[in-house]
Amino acid sequence: IIVIFMNINELIAIVKKKLLTQINIENLKIEDKTFLHKNHKGNQDGKFHLKISIESKELKEMNTIESNKKVYKVLEIEIKNFIHSLQLSIS
């Protein structure tokens, strides 16, 4: 088993780079909302809560399920390993 720890700044940098290179995005904002989970039973160290706001014509042309699936597919590894919760806003 390989355990890799990542800090929030590294995670945000990776998420930003992946989204910008794999989806046509006009504007992108990523916020760390991990503090919202500090006292939750399911909270784990090294797992983060991200709020991602994306402005993208490409995603807006898809239905909500398709656009969310595309973002989740791009961030598959990060979601599996480092993201506890993801708030997604697409406009």
Image: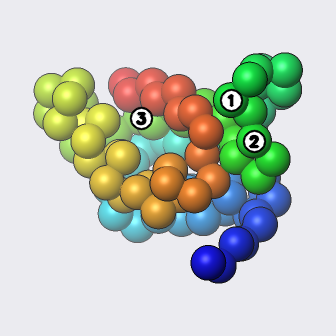
Q: Residue drawn at (53%, 27%), measured in percent from left and top?
A: 87
- In the rendered image of this protein, does residue 63 appear above or below residue 79? above
- Number of residues whose C-alpha sits closer than 10 Å to that of mark 3, classed few (under 14), some (14–19) or many (20 or more): some
Find residue 39 and report its horizontal and vertical position in percent. Answer: 84, 20
6 left or right of 29 in image: right
Residues tagged 1 and 2 counted as in contact (Cβ below 8 A): yes
In what element is the residue under mark 3?
strand
Q: Which residue is mark 2?
A: 44
Q: Which residue is mark 1?
A: 42
Marks 3 and 1, the one that precedes in the sequence: 1
- Number of residues whose C-alpha sits closer than 10 Å to that of mark 1, classed few (under 14), some (14–19) or many (20 or more): few
**Image quarter in which the N terminus is found:** bottom right
Nearest the viewer among 60 and 26 is: 60
Q: CA distance from mark 1 to mark 2?
A: 6 Å
- In the rendered image of this protein, does residue 26 appear above or below residue 66? below
Number of numbered tags placed on the structure image: 3
Name which residue type carries label 3. Glu
Find residue 85 and report its horizontal and vertical position in percent. Answer: 58, 33
Q: CA distance from mark 3 to mark 2?
A: 30 Å
Q: Is residue 31 in view from this perspective?
A: no
Name which residue type carries label 1. Gly
